[in-house]
Structures are given as structure tokens and as C-alpha cells.
Image (cartoon, rainbow, N blue to C red):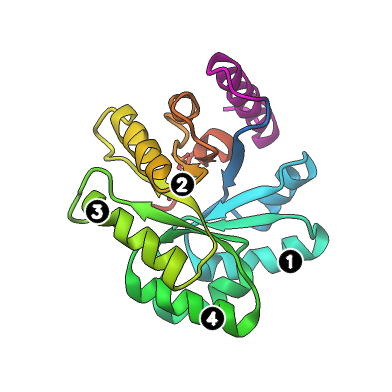
Amino acid sequence: MGSAIDNLNTVRDEIAAAETDAGRDAGAVTLVAVSKTFGVERIQPVVDAGQRVFGENRVQEAAGKWPELKQVTPDLSLHLIGPLQTNKVKQAVGLFDVIQTVDRPKLAKSLANEMEKTGLWPDCFIQVNTGEEPQKAGVLPADIDGFVAECRDVLQLPVAGLMCIPPVDEDPSPHFALLAKFAQRNGLAGLSMGMSADFQTAVMLGATHVRVGSAIFGARDKPL
Ligand SMILES: *Cc1c(COP(=O)(O)O)cnc(C)c1O
């Protein structure tokens, strides 16, 4: 692997090529650079290279590095892409610009309360367990329409789209296609899907956000 900046430029070029191949507009896809496990000293050069959208999967870890990074570069946008416990909602609403992992009614209610209280309204994505894996977070396909309606119409959360993490050992394409179908059926524009191994496929199938970590920052030492 090259430097994170070389890698970033390669990933950008690959996204642009996939947009063209898919007949989509240039810039239709937002690259979320996933910086989990990496420290400020590894992230700052990527910010300096012009990247503005980042993803973290732990609230606590993000709280330890992003206030400092955001102070230097106020137009950064930080996405939460990992599980959110209700006792971390207050912290998450204060820190993240987008919360991609809304996956259960209790969490949705807690987010709605906190947003009402603070007047901060981070965009929300609803995480869908497209592979119906028992150990994985996300709303089951059968429950999506009801959950979207509850979040959007009853709780008035700013629901921007859907997010999925396909099963590791399967072709992701059917999962991406399924997520796109669910989003369209619910009138949602946002589709967060595709990681280092499969972001081009996700762009072909309509992703608006791809979450790319190791292809930019290199392999992570710590297990997830
Ligand atoms: C870590 C992570 C990613 C990035 O994975 P890579 O394979 O390193 O690109 C994307 N999405 C989620 C939810 C993650 O936890």
C-alpha cells in the first residue's frame, strides 16, 4: 500500500470511474473515509489532502480525537457507522453530523428526544440487516417500512436513507440491490453501502455514500 494520500486519490479515481460507468453524475457518491483505530496524526494529512467526510464506529474513540480535528477544520462531517447504545445518545448527537446506525425503536425515540432538546439534527440512516444474520445489528427487511414510518412520521427524525453491511462471505450485489429497492419504496434518497472490497459494485448499484477504511488508511492493527 502507498501513503494514505496516494490511496485516497486512487479511491477517488475509482469512485469517479464507477460513476461514469454507471451513467451517474460526477460527484454523486460521497466518500466516507473510515478512520477508526487511527489517531489524529494519521487522519490530519488526509484532511489536509481535502477529504472532509469521515466515519467512526465507536462514540468513545471518536470523542477522543474529533473535537480537536474539527476545531482546526470546522467543515468536517463526521458519520457514526457503528452500533449506538442509548446511554451514548447525548454524546453522539453532540459529536456526529450523521448517524448511520439507527436500528431499533428505543434508540430512535432516544435520538428524537435528544435532538428536540438540543436543536441539533444529525441526518439519520436506518441500518438494515439485509442478510438477516442473527448476530448483526439492523432492522429486518420485513420491518423496514414500519420502522421508517415510525422514525420519519411519528418521531420526526431527519431520515436521509438506508445503510447495510452485507454478510462477509457472500456476493454483496444482491444485498446492495435489495437496499436500493427498500430505499426507493420508502422515498429515501440516501444509500450507504460498499466498503474497501466492494465500493465500485455499490456505486454501480446506486450507493450515495461508500464507507472506505483500509483501502485508504491501510490495514488496522486492532480487531474491530
Ligand atoms: C470498518 C467499517 C467500514 C470500512 O471497512 P473497510 O473494509 O476497512 O473499508 C465500513 N463500514 C463499517 C460499518 C465499518 O465498521
| Mark closer to the observer (2, 4) | 2
Q: Mark 2 points at which residue?
A: 187
Residue 32's mark? none
**Quarter of image, res 169:** top left
Position of residue 132 measured from the top left corner of the image (x, y, whole percent): 20, 48
Q: Name the residue under label 4.
A: 114
Magenta range is: 1-25
Q: Is mark 2 within 8 Å of ligand 1?
A: no
| Mark closer to the observer (2, 1) | 2
What is the CA distance from the residue labelled 1 to the residue labelled 4?
Answer: 23 Å
Whether label 2 touches label 1, CB < 8 Å: no
Q: Name the residue under label 1.
A: 68
In terms of sequence position, does the residue under pointer 2 or pointer 3 come before the other? Answer: 3
Whether label 4 touches label 3, CB < 8 Å: no
| Mark closer to the observer (1, 3) | 3
Q: How crowded is mark 1: few (under 14 residues within 10 Å), some or many (20 or more)?
A: few
Whether label 2 touches label 3, CB < 8 Å: no
Horizontal side of residue 102 vs 189, given as left or right: left
The residue that appears at 42% across and 40% down in the rendered structure is 184
In terms of sequence position, does the residue under pointer 1 or pointer 4 come before the other? Answer: 1
Q: In this view, does 204 lie above or below 84?
A: above
